[in-house]
Image (tube, rainbow, N blue to C red):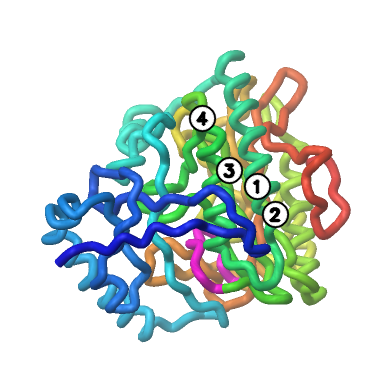
Amino acid sequence: MDVKDTTTTEKTTEDKPKSQVLQSCSTIGCGKPASMHCPTCLKLGLAPSYFCSQDCFKTFWPIHKLFHKKQEEQAVAKSKFNYTGTLRPGKISPRLYVPEHIKKPDYATSGIPNDEINSKFTNKVIEVKSFEDIEKMRKVSLLGRQALDLGHSLVRPGITTDEIDKAVHQFIIENDAYPSPLNYHNFPKSICTSVNEVICHGIPDDRPLEEGDIVNLDISLYKFGYHTDLNETYHVGKVAESSAYLVEHSYRCLEEAIKICKPGTMYRDVGNIIGKYIHERGLEINRTYCGHGIGNLFHIMPTIPHYPKNKAPNFMKVGHVFTIEPMINQGTHQDVLWPDDWTAVTADGQRSSQFEHTLVITEGGYEILTSRLSTSPALDFNVGIL
């Protein structure tokens, strides 16, 4: 069996030519740019898998054919899965190519973040970043903000989250950076896109956004040896008042939490502040997913719960760098995982919204490394300090 060459030129929605967004070879450990696709994937109605050469495809075929079986099994699981809301998964396009010259984290090829996994077992101390560390994180965080602003500018009814993923991916690699989610524990895309009842880790696919949706774009990237992490939730066209209320207050609670950040603040107090604000407004806080330390590794100490009466240890010190990213739900705090083992949705199918920043503790309080710019597209409500 041979692969077929499907080299094409990507176009914008206005049908203007732009730089081609290359796929990455599906052979484990290869990662070269690829334009040849597996004909069996297309025959089975799967998103195409791409390969860089006939030799690579034939060498990997004994393993790749197991992928076909797994996809068929997942299709059966999806058909039997009791979805909590109206959203359904679409087709997921292949992993995109990252040029060889771009410095990559350890999991970029293997899919396993060994350095991060080992750090969780060997290092319980929160890293204090040096002046040089923080300066590099300022630079990568500015690039992360610009990438998120690009994604925000594309949000509208009719566009697919896959199209947004490709545009942001292209921006990131053109700036010699690596999209941190790509192949992290085998995550297949370069950003996370969480629509309506999706709490977090939604996988970009071919479903067009619809009028009245809300969508969260979660952007993380790696450059200068450091990661950054930020996200925002946007209206798609005109949304219901209940959705607008949810989105605005998911932003406001982050705003309130950041205000207390300074040397000496207990990390557990972040959840107490968010809890008081959110519960007074009749909303709920997801308890599964937390804020986290970040730096030369994607996820490190500390862990920062967003709900009240948590028992998170430690207090903030000058040089600590971490994210706060509360996920706020209209109904229950509980979540359910889709069969893809990534997409976390609300257990009752009601909507969820999230905002996230990466910040550093300073002598005077804090600095938001991923703060909005004067050029950032406006949010759907009046913003404050963030």
Residue 318 in picture, x, y percent from top left:
64, 20
Looking at the image, the residue that sits furthest to the right is 382
Identify whether 110 is placed above or below 83: above
Q: Residues within 10 Å of mark 4 (few under 14, many from 20)?
A: many
Q: Is residue 238 above or below residue 379?
A: below
| Distance between mark 2 and mark 1 Cα atoms | 6 Å
Sooner in the amino-acid sequence: mark 4 or mark 3: 3
Assign a secondary structure to mark 4.
Answer: strand
The residue depicted at 44 percent of the width and 59 percent of the height is 8
State yes or no: discs 2 and 1 in contact (Cβ < 8 Å): yes
Asked whether residue 40 is in view, the answer is yes
Q: Earlier in the sequence, mark 3 or mark 1?
A: 1
Of callouts 4 and 1, the N-terminal one:
1
User: Is residue 217 located in the magenta-colored stretch of the structure?
Assistant: no
Q: Which residue is mark 4?
A: 223
Q: Position of residue 192 (x, y in %)?
A: 53, 56
Q: In the rendered image, which residue does mark 1 sit on?
A: 148
